Each structure stands twice: as C-alpha cells, then as structure tokens.
Amino acid sequence: MNKHHESTGPADEQQITLRGPAELADALPYLMGFHPSDSVVMVALHGGRGRFGGRLRLGIPQSPKEWGPVADQLAECLISGSERRGSRPDAIVIFLCQDPVGGESAGQTMERLKPLAQRLRTACGALDVPVLEALCISDGRYWSYCCPDGRCCPTQGNPLALPGTTVMAAAATYAGIQVRGSLRDMEERLAPWQTAASSAQCHALDTAGASLVSRILDTEGRGEVAKETLELARVLMDRLRQAPSAVPSVTDRSDDHLISHDEAAAVILGLQDRETRDKAAEWMEGAEADSALRLWRALARRCVGPYVEHSAAPLTLAGWVSWSTGDEPGARVALGLALRADPDYTFAQLLHQACNEGLDPETLRRCLRGEDGADGGVLNGGTKGSGTPSNGLRNSGVRGGATHSARREGRARLRAEHRPRPRPARRTPSDAKARRATPGSARPGTSVARRRTRDAGRYGQRGTRSGR
C-alpha cells in the first residue's frame, strides 16, 4: 500500500449539477484528472447543495486486515484537511474503483469491497460527517452501497455512460479539463523498465557508480561531477527537444532510444547529490519545461533492479515540473511514486504536501529563479519594491541563479508554514511492513558501491546527514 495519499483542494470550476449515482460515477475522472484504478477516492461536500471540496485518493489496501485502520486515517485526513482549508465537510462521497482480479466477476469485486465501504462509512460517521453516497466502479459498471432500491440500483449494477456523451463531459471539454487516461497508464510511463535492456542499464549504473563514488565523496570532485551532470542533462534535453512529440507511448519509446545507457547512468547518479538536483529543478517553465519533463520521465524508467530507490530524484523533478506547468494530477502521480521509492525523500515530501494543500507553485518558482525583492520575487510576505523583503528572500537578482542557501531557506519556510496541524499519529500494521519492503532498499546482494553512490550526495564527508 502506498501510504502517501493524494488530496486536492476545491477548484474554481464551472458549476454543474449532478443528480444520482450515474452522474457521480461519470464525474469521477473529471474530478481527479484521470481514471483512478485500484483506488479509494473520497470527496468532501459543502453546503446544502453539496459543493465539491477537497478530494483524497489512496491505493486500495490488499489485506482486509488493513481496511479498518486505513478507513479511520482517511476519514480523519479528509475532514481535518478540509477544516484547514476553510470549512468542515457537510457530507462525503466515496468511490471504490477496482477491476476484477483472479477470475472474479465485477459483481464479486463489488461484494468483496463491501466491507471496506462499510468501514469508511462508519469512520466518517464517527466524526459526525455522513456519507451521502458510496459507489463501486468495476469493469465499466457501477453499484451503490447506499441505495437499497433494486429498480434503480440492480444487483448486476448499471453500465457507465459512454465517454463524451454526458453533461459533465461536455462541460469539461468546454472548460478545457483533460482526463489523462487511467492511473495505471500514468504510472507505467514512469515505471522502471521490465525489458531485456534492463540488465544492460543496470550494468551501466554499476560501472558509473564505481567511477563516480570516490569523486562525489571528494569536495573538489563533487563540484566537477555536478557540472558534468548538468551539462550532460542539457545535452540530452536539447536532443529530446529536437525530436517530434507524438502520443505519450510513442514519445516515451522515442525518448528511450535517444538516450544511451551510459548517459542515463551518469545523470541518474549525479542527481543523487541534492545541490545538483536543486539546480536541475530550475528547468521548470518556458521552453525548458517540456524537454526537462521528458528527460526526468526517461531517467525514472532507467532506475532498474537495485537502483529503484535512485528514481526518487528524477521522479520528484518530474512531479515538480508537472506541478509548475499546471498538471496537478501528473504531479501527484510522480511525487507519489517518488515517495514509494524512498518514503523519506524530503524534497518529494515537501512538494507532495504543498501540491495537496493547493499552494501556488509560483512561490517556489520565485525561490528557484532567485528573483530580487525589488521585482516582487520574494517568498511569503515580502514587500514588492521595498528593496529588502520583510519576510522573504533576497539574492543576486540573476534569473536562474538562486543561491543554495536561498533555496534551502525557501523550502524551510514552506515546510514550516504549511505543516499539518499536530494530531495523534496512527500506525497500522502495514506501515512497518511497507517500510521494510520498500523497493530498492539495501538488502543482501546489493553492492556497497551502489549504496555509497546513492548516499554520496546525502552525506557530508564527516558522515553528517544532509537534507534531501
């Protein structure tokens, strides 16, 4: 189970009135920006007319033993998060989305998930927020767990509306809202290779690690590696920019062929240094953003075998560029995968939380640009045109030249000012299991060179842990 849930705040959208389970089921992909396969989705409703508010998604836990604790956590998270953003929900709508597995029918999937729906309803009710509707969506059909009337909600379920034929679809098209396919499709674009080329890429990573680790651990050599990493990344971005874009699957295959194993290995390992990664994060807008996003996706796919944990850096950069360019669903998927690869990756934690809290990415863009206070480029309360920001950051004023200390201060401010309110931590039995089973964790058979290369940019020469 991915314990890093995804949530969003209310958005300014065209007002649409939805009536009944059928229209709610049809609206779900437009609310999320994708089809949330294998997911629990909870949506807060506000006011007498049920205005949509915050929404939350989590992968369905595989073990039914986890359903009770997870239901309690999700209900508390959605309600407390809504309160932080302005008001307590008046009701909640629940969606359980999962296609049949193991030869079962869609109806059997609905029955299997019924206890989870009941636990979620009970958890919300315990916090005095009723569940208005709970739907199961499976194999192109939907069922209501709340409606007992077989005339409108038969036991065999109802078919979903054909894509593009509903009022919600028409309104979404008019508003420019895009549905990016299924969650599974979005994750596969970022998943490590499972092909014959994986072994060659793993060998290239081993070879690059053996030559880079001693240089990264040396003060002078670390700077040289950082320069080489950024220069090579620039070359690869230019190469990708010159290649024509097509549908996502074709573009991804083309990008994979344009980057050699050795080139990918060098940049992946170089990005394990946090200062190098922060400089790469400045490629977040304008003409650079598209080619940078393609590069980070391609590098994430190259983090194969024991190098899965190394994917946290390119995945976080992919999430940052997506968020910066307005693709919030894509950002949440990339950042969620980064935290799945390395749950303690601080930069991903910060961005994931900020994106979920509905913050404006311009705050961090200004910090990374290094804009001068006189131009309004201050963080969190600086006075525009005042020369010295009262509560913000000041630096050299050169675009793209933000100092590391300024970036570090900006991240610290974001973390401090937008940290969730303290509340009792609830650990589930799966938490420890999930942490022990994190893909890419050091384990017998993983070479010392691989671990040292991964950690070289995260530890000082005296062994002091540095922020990630």
Image: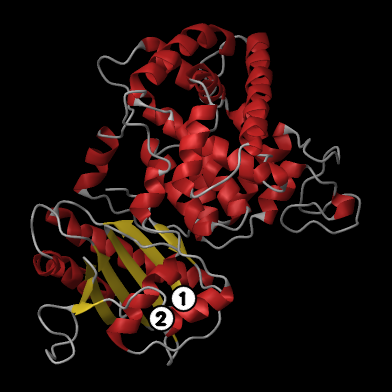
- Amino acid carrying label 2: it is Leu
Horizontal and vertical percent for residue 70?
A: 25, 58
- Structural crowding at the residue carrying mark 1, measured as other residues with C-alpha within 10 Å and reported as few (<14), some (14–19) or many (≥20): many
As rendered, which of 194 and 367 lies closer to the eye? 194
Q: Which residue is mark 2?
A: 45
Q: Which residue is mark 1?
A: 53
Quarter assignment of residue 165? bottom left
Q: Residue at x 29, y 37 (%)?
A: 435
Relative side of 269 to 138, left or right? right
Q: CA distance from mark 1 to mark 2?
A: 6 Å
Relative side of 93 to 50, left or right? left
Residue 98 visible in the displayed image: yes
299, above or below 175, in the image: above
- Structural crowding at the residue carrying mark 2, measured as other residues with C-alpha within 10 Å and reported as few (<14), some (14–19) or many (≥20): many
Horizontal and vertical percent for residue 26?
A: 35, 76
248, above or below 56, in the image: above
169, above or below 200, in the image: below
As rendered, which of 43 and 295 lies closer to the eye? 295
Q: Residue at x 56, y 11 (%)?
A: 217
Horizontal and vertical percent for residue 338?
A: 43, 40
The colour style of the image is secondary structure
Among the two numbered marks 1 and 2 on one chain, the one whose residue lies closer to the N terminus: 2
- Amino acid carrying label 1: it is Gly
Quarter assignment of residue 318? top right
